[in-house]
């Protein structure tokens, strides 16, 4: 009886399993067939962003990563475009940070103050393209940015919305959704860290609020140039949006993505007492 | 002068909002000075996050003095490879001439500007030189 019951149970389970397999077999191949045709069409509509890219200001860097004159000119140009116009509250916060940096530099000009860890973690958005080289992976459902310094951005283009507020918290890359307007990818990003990174010395950053919001319009304007049209909005921290057009250049002298931030290998610029130092031996 | 220098550093700090963030600041190097070191490679470290050349430099003014080891910082391997470097570009025992921006704090270290290998040819992609590298010990130029 027990055996029969067990056998019957097994039979029932087997039947259920077979049903699931059949159902799955009916559903998934059918979906895959439809999906595959539709996806091939969807892929065919996508632009070609293949290749390795870098921020155009980095073109021509020398062995010590010194910028070329043209690179310096471009960085200054971008800096001017990206300079925030703060509300009084955030201007005061910015002034305070600036004062601390000035005091730290004055106290010890030889060892720059460190306000971020050395780049052993991925640079946060929107500094994801600096430094390093990067690639784009485009599918109908998602465009992915992958850099040699470990930055990975997932830009969902499957029609989803941002998560509800109670499922968002500040992250390195934030939450990005996008859609295609012809060959232009329009990206909306929220949920980043409440700051805009600013620069070369010690990762100095601008304070921002949790209403920080980015809109990017990305397009490959020629074989060698990608253009990213940024708009940065923050009604709490900014009196007006920041707007800038940043360009990425196709890397033509190299064709391999090689990771460059495993700092444990040989970190010789450690932070000691809040300052960058150098180990010469 | 010091005030101008501080202003310069802060200007560099805020020069590239939202975009450029480096592995670390380069403000510890005096990029207004170039020193030429002529010596022998002790070790070429092809490593992340930066490559380094350890070079032993005798003092031509005082041959009896013990040679001094310098640590020269470079870019990351992937960036150097783009510029023509390879993990075997330098080997222990190679005679080299290296132009650097020295560390501000006086330690025997610096940021690479240009490396001339044992065959007398420049390796990779040097930064602009203030004047051609000269043989023999170390020499200094300022902007």
Image (spheres, rainbow, N blue to C red):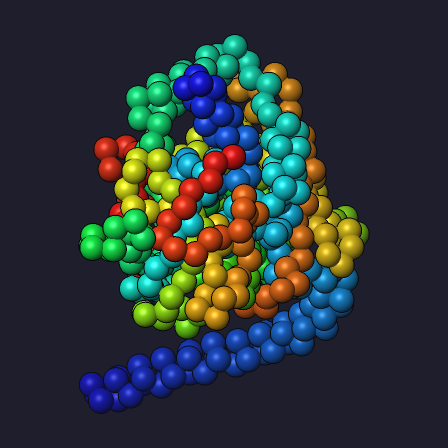
Q: Position of residue B84 (x, y in %)?
A: 54, 66
> Residue A18, relative to residue A263: is it above or below?
below
Q: Position of residue A142 (x, y in %)?
A: 60, 57
The single residue placed furthest to the top in the displayed view is A88
Which quadrant of the structure image shows residue A53?
A: bottom right
Q: Position of residue A230 (x, y in %)?
A: 66, 37
Residue A150 in view of the camera: no
Residue A220 in view of the camera: yes
Q: Position of residue B13 (x, y in %)?
A: 47, 30
Quick check: A47 left or right of B111?
right
Quick check: B7 left or right of A280?
right
The residue at the point 59 percent across, 59 percent down is A135
Between residue A248 and residue A175, name the one nearer to us. A248
The residue at the point 37 percent across, 69 percent down is B94
The residue at the point 32 percent across, 84 percent down is A10
* Label tally: 0
């Amino acid at each position: 009886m027990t055996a029969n019951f067990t056998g019957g149970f097994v039979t029932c389970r087997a039947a259920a399993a077979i049903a699931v397999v059949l159902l799955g077999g009916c559903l998934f191949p059918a979906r895959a067939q439809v999906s595959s045709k539709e996806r091939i069409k969807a892929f065919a509509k996508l632009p070609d962003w293949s290749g390795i890219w870098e921020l155009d200001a980095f073109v021509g860097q020398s062995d010590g990563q010194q910028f070329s004159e043209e690179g310096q000119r471009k960085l200054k140009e971008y800096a001017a475009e990206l300079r925030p116009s703060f509300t009084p509250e955030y201007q005061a916060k910015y002034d305070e940070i600036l004062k601390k940096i000035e005091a730290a530099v004055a106290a010890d000009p030889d060892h720059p103050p460190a306000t971020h860890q050395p780049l052993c973690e991925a640079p946060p958005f929107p500094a994801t393209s600096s430094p390093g080289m990067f690639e784009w992976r485009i599918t109908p459902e998602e465009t992915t940015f992958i850099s040699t310094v470990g930055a990975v951005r997932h830009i969902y283009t499957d029609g989803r919305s941002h998560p509800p507020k109670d499922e968002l918290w500040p992250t390195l890359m934030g939450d990005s959704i996008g859609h295609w307007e012809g060959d232009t990818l329009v990206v909306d990003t929220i949920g980043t860290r409440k700051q805009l990174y600013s620069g070369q010395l010690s990762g100095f950053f601008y304070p921002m609020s949790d209403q920080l919001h980015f809109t990017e319009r990305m397009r490959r304007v020629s074989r060698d140039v990608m253009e990213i049209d940024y708009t940065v909005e923050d009604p709490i921290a900014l009196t007006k949006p920041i707007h800038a057009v940043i360009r990425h250049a196709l890397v033509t002298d190299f064709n391999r993505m090689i990771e460059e931030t495993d700092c444990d290998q040989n970190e010789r610029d450690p932070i000691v007492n809040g300052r960058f130092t150098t180990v010469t031996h | 002068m010091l005030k101008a220098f501080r202003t310069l550093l802060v200007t560099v700090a805020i020069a590239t909002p939202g975009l450029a963030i480096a592995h670390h600041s380069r403000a510890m190097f005096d990029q207004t000075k170039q020193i030429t070191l002529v010596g022998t490679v002790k070790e070429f470290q092809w490593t992340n996050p930066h490559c380094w050349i350890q070079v032993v430099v005798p003092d031509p003014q005082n041959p009896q003095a013990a040679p001094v080891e310098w640590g020269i910082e470079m870019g990351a391997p992937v960036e150097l490879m783009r510029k023509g470097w390879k993990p075997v570009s330098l080997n222990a025992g190679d005679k080299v001439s290296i132009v650097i921006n020295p560390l501000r704090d006086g330690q025997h270290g610096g940021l690479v500007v240009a490396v001339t290998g044992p065959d007398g040819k420049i390796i990779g992609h040097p930064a602009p030189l203030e004047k051609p590298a000269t043989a023999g010990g170390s020499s200094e130029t300022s902007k």
